[in-house]
Image (cartoon, grey):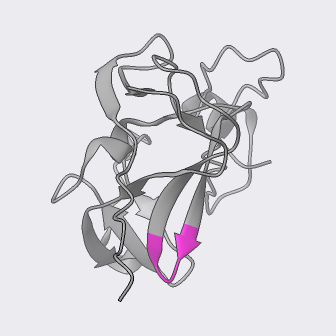
Amino acid sequence: MPSRVRKVPPTVKVRRSKVHGRGVYAGESIRKGTRIIEYTGKRVPERDVTDDENDPHTFYFGLDNGIVIDPEIGGNEARWINHSCDPNCESIDEDGRIFIYALRKIEPGEELSYDYALQIDEPITRKSKKQHECFCGSPDCRGTMLGL
């Protein structure tokens, strides 16, 4: 009977970020295509999530099936991964679970990021773009975390 080798996820570290607040950094070299971490937290129906108009920034991760992952309860380091318009990671929905994968080789100490491509119910305006302003610093920055 062949032995099963458990794939150990790469080491990540949370610390202060130049992009925004906290960030997640590679603790070791991460190969392109590597599954880095799962975005975890309590699952709640989207209809039960209350909007805070005074703070449009949340850690909620919305799934296509109408469920929202709230990392404030049972969440992990993935909640601190910042947005970038030129990301080195992507989020992939695998049967209702969100995993973060490396889009390219990531060097030790490099901050992890993915494109949030946020969706809002109202029309996208200058005001909504400003509320969801991007600070990634990429030469290709579109100025907002909204999915245009």
- Name the residue: 43% across, 27% down: 28
- Residue 35: percent from left, percent from top: 51, 55
Q: Which corner quadrant of the image does residue 126 belong to?
A: top right
Q: Residue furthest top?
A: 18
- Residue 80: percent from left, percent from top: 36, 36
Q: Residue furthest right?
A: 140
- Left or right: 76 with respect to 62? left
Label count reads 0
- Residue 84: percent from left, percent from top: 64, 31
Q: Which corner quadrant of the image does residue 127 belong to?
A: top right
- Name the residue: 72% across, 32% down: 85
Q: Is residue 146 above or below residue 144?
A: below
- Front-most of residues 117 and 1: 1
- Left or right: 28 with respect to 87? left
- Front-most of residues 139 and 102: 102
Which residue range is magenta in the image?
93-97
- Name the residue: 48% across, 60% down: 99
